[in-house]
Structures are given as structure tokens and as C-alpha cells.
Amino acid sequence: MSLTSGTPLAVAILAAAGSLAAIVWAWPRLARPRPGYLAARLAVIAVSQLLVTAAFLIWLNSYFSFYATWGQLTGASAGTAVAAQAAPGTAAHLVVIDRSQPGPAPVQRRAEALGAGTEVVPRPAAPGTAGRLLQVVIKGERTGLSSGPGYVYLPPQYFQRAYARARFPVVLTLTGYPGQAASIVDRLALPATVARLIAAGRIRPAVFVMLNVSPLFPLDTECTDVPGGPQVESFLAQDVPRAIEQTFRVTASPAGWGTLGYSTGGYCAAKLAMMYPDRFSAAVSMAGYYQAIPGQYVPHLWGGSKGYRLENSPDWRLRHLPAPPVSVLATSSWVGEKTLPGTLAFLREIHPPMRGYSLIIRQGGHNFRTWDRELPPGLVWLSRRLS
Amino acid sequence: MNTRDRDWPRGRWPGRGREGERRVGPRGMPLLVLLAVLAGALLAGTLWLWPVLARRGVGFVALRIALLVALQASVIGAVFVWVNRVNEFYVSWSDLLGTNHPAAQVAAVAPGAAHDAAVSAGPGVQTLASRQVVLPGARPRPGGRLEKVRFDGTVSGIAATGYVYLPPRHSTASRLPVIVVISGQAGNGAASYGAARVAAAAAAQIAARRMPPAIVAMLPPAVAGRASWGCLDSPAGPQAGTFFSQDLPLALVRAYRAVPGPSGWAVLGGPGGGYCALQLATAPSGQFRVAAAAPGTYTAPPGAGGTVAAPGLRRQDSMLWRLQHWPPPPVQVLFTGAGGPRRFVALVRPPMTVTTARPAAGPASLAPVLDWIGHALAAAPGAAGSGG
């Protein structure tokens, strides 16, 4: 059952309200001055409090789009997810599930419906002025991993005659962990913001691919090629770009490919661009970190090798490997971000040909409201660096 | 919001926020304590006043509801502050309520980096020597050019000397496919996999139209010294795998107008290069569609390759493990010699294909291999080949 749909929240709210009403109604029966009745009062208040707290936490989870199903929350599906990566690949590497217009209205998060996919037919029909948002599942040709529900935003120009032969730049956009790709659409409001900035002439039209940073969610793979395990780095940096290239009119040159992400997605945006300058040329890391950290539910992220862990740390790479020819914009907050010291240390290490840029706001926590504010200047910066 | 880039003031950070927000904001310990004490007091009060509020009357019912709601709200408030403390979601009241935010600016970290142009890299290739390849015969004809070059790895930082054969009319042709030949004999002129003989064989096959015009890059497997056996990335050490899978394609695409991979890219493992060829072709970040090597099961990198004490990393260095645990890659493999390795062949599933050839002995053995590679490159990925 979906955790972020309205049903569990409605049930929880009804149960909480019902428990409160029951206490008010049963109040006189528990009023006798004996210890047993005092314990009974305490018990009913505790039960009611639990129900109210549960309703609050379910609402909080829905608001932040952390976990989409109960299995993800408990990690119950972790075992099957690992096994699934060994499944043989199929011919179609990108399947479009759903189409809708980008806008403030939330995208339907129908993880259950993803089984029934249709082949992609990018139809040049009625894209309007906001472009088109496709729900997609990308299957890795080489890694065998599946993206889970993801989104592709095509700008209005993609469907216009003047751009019929144009190849568009692409931005690979990654969530934090835990997170859902849908939160890029309805919490970060990336497609709506992009459509607005394109219409205002502030950024050039580009294709945005929006994915969960952990394709095997709830496994927290930190965009790493896990030794003897899921090859998530190769999936995001090789399989996904190849599938996008084969499906949409996008540029093949690294000069036209960028990454963008928040939190874990910020770490991955920076790391993937630095590891694959043959694929990406610019990265926006919002509230990211720059040292490899252990992932949840993944016991051996680096196969027991300290050296391999270091290789996955942007900080270490800057000190020990040639600086890659990429630009990175790192954002953080002077107040409210644990990532601030790490961000400043990372920026100080950057040297040519790599270029570093900072966007440090006065205050803002590790939340979508902060990233909403950093997104427009980040997109403008990114647009100037992609061709 | 103003997004004009400007130089970053060195050693000085503008616009620090007030640290006081940390204590009184929605993640402060005082607030958490206050809410917890309030919740405890309300709970005690509720239990104490219970009999009083048990009387009949609208006013008492309203008081019950008010007391319960206040208790619940204080507990929920404490839960929220605790969750917010752990996760640092909202740092201040204005952060939580979305009010009063001054604009932020993008700043370039290093002086001079402020201009908007994309970062560009050099080609990563330096030509050390160059000579014509001449096709033998009654009237010798030009057969292209052989260059001795130095590759400077953009990502790996490895600098390696190798050879690049460029077919005739390379400069005017459209982007060409690539054959990477990895062998310990690349620098040995007399050996059958020496650069001069490989270039001569390629020129002859191209002239005879038995293979399409292609760029042939020749490199030793040990590009980073002895530590790079098997073209693997050594953890926190020489990144030989990265050199072959990223730096070399990048350099050949930029400097010699090679077709961007993986379509049109083949790797041929000569003496000492067979493991390299197969490991590069089967890697998840693979840049190659076609591979040829001497028969073998290739369960471990040659020589001292297994020195890294990381079992997880070493396990996937076996080709048999890869074939068992990773999806079959869309590559065509040719085993160039008698006796195809049965365990390897038995694990191959579509779209991967494996072909076993018994080439003629002697110096002419390279020609049929090049023919097969040329044929495989010309065919659609995964469409040609047999066996498997």
C-alpha cells in the first residue's frame, strides 16, 4: 500500500479523532477515585496520543515524500531489490508510463501502476507553453538496474517547428535520500520553475531527467558501483544517459550534459560529474556533502576497501587525481546547514581546470523551502554552462 | 533574485546569520524542554482534574476537549522539535513559515573563473612521431599514417605512450570507428602485435575492403606501471580501467574525430592484453561493443593483479563471476584460437554473443581477426555473430 497517498493519512486522522471523541464520551465512567481507574485514564490518553502522533508522522512523511510504501519504510523489500538487479535486460530501455502537464498540481504518485507500461512515443501534440512531463522507467542496459518511477521534462520548444532539428541539453536531477523522484516535481517544483524561467528567457530550453538517487530504494547506495553488488554509479552515469540519448532529441556532447541534486543527490551530482567529465560538464550540488558516507541497508558499500571509499569522495579526488574539466556550483546556508563546513572545505580544494562556484544563503535548513530558493539561481548558472 | 557572478572574496565570508537562532528557533533544546514540561504538566493536570470534569454540562465537555487538545498539541510539538533537531529541516521560524528571505548570489570561488564559458579540456594527446604506412606491391601505395603518441588521461592522470593508425583520407572522412589493440608487444617492431605490423595489417584489410576504414589505437596493458595489471582501477591507486574506458575514448574522439562510443568501438587483446580486452568489454561502464582475445576463462587479472585485500572488489574481477551476476552486456566476443573455453561460453546469454575462430598460424593471423572485427563493427549492435 502506498504511504504517501491520501488513504493511510485519512485512516490515521479518523482513528485519532475517534479516540479523542471516545475519551470525551467515556470520561465520567473513568472518574472514580481508585488506582485502577487512574491507570485506565493514563492508558486511554496514551493510546489516543499514539494515534495522533502516528497521524502526524504519516502527514510529515507525505509532506517530505520520504518513503512511498511500508516496505520501503521498514526496509522489508531490500532483499528482493538486490536480487532484481541481476535480471536480464530487455530491448526497451526507457518506458513512458504517464503524461501530464507540469505545474503546481502534484503529479500522481502511482508506484503500483508502473507495471503496465507503454512504449515511448514522443508525440508532438499539444505541449502548450509549459512543455510536457513524462513519467518514465529507465532500465539499465549494462547494469540491469531499473530507475523506478522517474520523470522526464520536455520544454515547449522541444515540440516547436523551429526546434525540430535541435538537440537539447540535458540535466540529470537526483533526489536526496530518503526520497522519491516525485518530490522533485511537486516539492522542489522543478518542472514548473524551469517552465517559468524558460518563458521569461532566463534559461535556455533543456530536458530534465528526474530520478531517485537510489534506484534500489530503500537501499541507500550513494550512487556507488558496489563491489560485487549493484552498479549504481554506472547506471546513473552511463546507462541513463544512453537511454535518454536513444529516446529523445538531446545532445551527445558532455558540454550539453549537467547534473543537479539536493542532499545525497548533491553529493552524487558533484561526484558523478567529477568522475565522468566525458559525460557531464557542470553540476549543481544543493546541500551536498563531499566525503563518501556509509549507506543504509548496504553493509559493504566499498567492498571492504578503504581506497575505494576514498575514490568515491570528491574531496579526496580533488587532492589526489587530476582536477576534472567541470564546473560545480555548491550551495549551503550560513545558519542551518550541517553541510556548511564540508561545502566550504570542498570549494577551497577546487583548482583549474575545474571551476567552483558558491551560493551560500544567510539561513535555511535542510529542506525543500531552502532548495526552492536556491533552485532559480542554480538553474540560471547551469544554463549558462551548458551548450 | 540577482544571479550575477562575482569574484569570491578570499578569506572573508559575507552575510553570516545570527547564531542566536540556533537556540530559540524551531530546533532549540529550550523549546523542546518547554514543550516536554508543558506536556507533563497537562498530563498531570488532566489526570488530577478528571473527576471534576466528569460532571454533566456543556462547559465541562468543552473543558475536557480543550485539555485533551492542549495535551496532544504539546506532545506533537515536542515530537516535531525533536524530529527537526535530528534532521535540521527548519532552522528558524522564518525558515518554517517561509518569510523574510534576502536574495543570495552565486559567487565564483577562484578569481577569473567568473565568466560564463563552459570549461574545456585539451585533447589529451601529444604526437611524438609520425610516418606514412605504405602498402606493399608492385606499385607501393599510401596506406594511411602511423603516429607515436602520448595520451594524457584527463580523469585518471595516467600518461601512456602508444600508437595510433589513421586510415587514408582520415581527415576528410566522417567520424570513424575505433579498434583499441592492447598488447605487451605494442612497442616491439618485430613482434606480430607490434605497432608497425598491426598498422600494416589494418591498412591492407582496409585497402582490400575487407574491413571498413577505422582508427587503430595500440597500447600496452601496463599503462601505469606494474600495478595496472588487467586494466583495472586500483583502489586509491593507478586508475588503469578509467584510462582505457574514459580517457582514451575522450582523447580519440577529440583529437582524431573518432565516433563516440560504445557503438563503433572494438577492443582487441593481443599477447598480455586478453584479460584487459574482456574486462573492458564486460564492465558496466563499458565503452566497447566488440572484443577479441585469446581463449581463456579469465577468472583473475594476470600477474599480481589480485593484490588488493578487498574481497568484494576482487570477486567481480572474474569474467565468470561477471557472466553469472551481471546482465549479459550487448557485446560480441571473438576467441582467436583453438579450443574455446567451455565454462565461459556456457555462461554467455543474449544479447551477448561469442564466436570461436581458428586463425591461420603465423604473421597473417591478424588479418582474419581484423576482418571479423570490421564485420562486427559494421553490423548493428548485437545483430551479427554466432555461437553463444
Image (spheres, coloured by chain):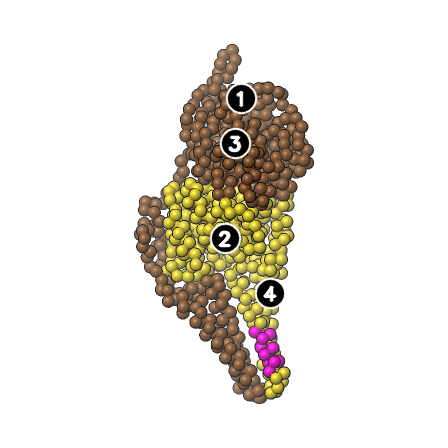
Chain colours: A yellow, B brown
Marks 3 & 1 on one chain? yes
Label annotation for residue A7: 4
**Residue A356 visible, this orientation:** yes
Give the crowd class for mark 1: few <14, some 14-19, many >=20 residues within 10 Å. some
The CA distance from mark 1 to mark 2 is 49 Å
SS for dot 1: loop
Against B215, is B24 above or below? Answer: below
Along the line of sight, which residue is nearer the eye, B114 or A203? B114
Give the Cα separation between the discs numbered 1 and 4.
Answer: 73 Å
Query: What residue is drawn where x is 49% and y is 39%?
Result: B239
Chain letter of the residue beneath label 4 in the structure image:
A
- Subunit under mark 2: A
Q: Amino acid at mark 4?
A: Thr
Tell me which numbered mark, 4 or 2, is placed earlier along the sequence.
Answer: 4
**Which amino acid, by three-letter code, is at mark 1?**
Ala
Numbered badge on residue B221: 3
Frontmost of labels 3 and 4 is 3
- The answer to whether A171 appears left or right of A58 in the picture is left
Judged from this view, the residue extending furthest toward the top is B138
Q: Is residue B318 magenta?
A: no
Q: Are marks 3 and 4 in contact (CB under 8 Å)?
A: no
What quarter of the picture does the N terminus of chain B occupy?
bottom left
Q: Which residues are magenta?
A: A38-49
Marks 3/4: CA–CA distance? 60 Å
Give the residue displayed 57% in from the left and 52% down from the top.
Answer: A299
Q: Is there one chain holding both mark 1 and mark 2?
A: no
Look at mark 2 in the image and give the residue it sits on.
A293
- Tell me how far mark 3 sits from mark 2, CA to CA: 33 Å
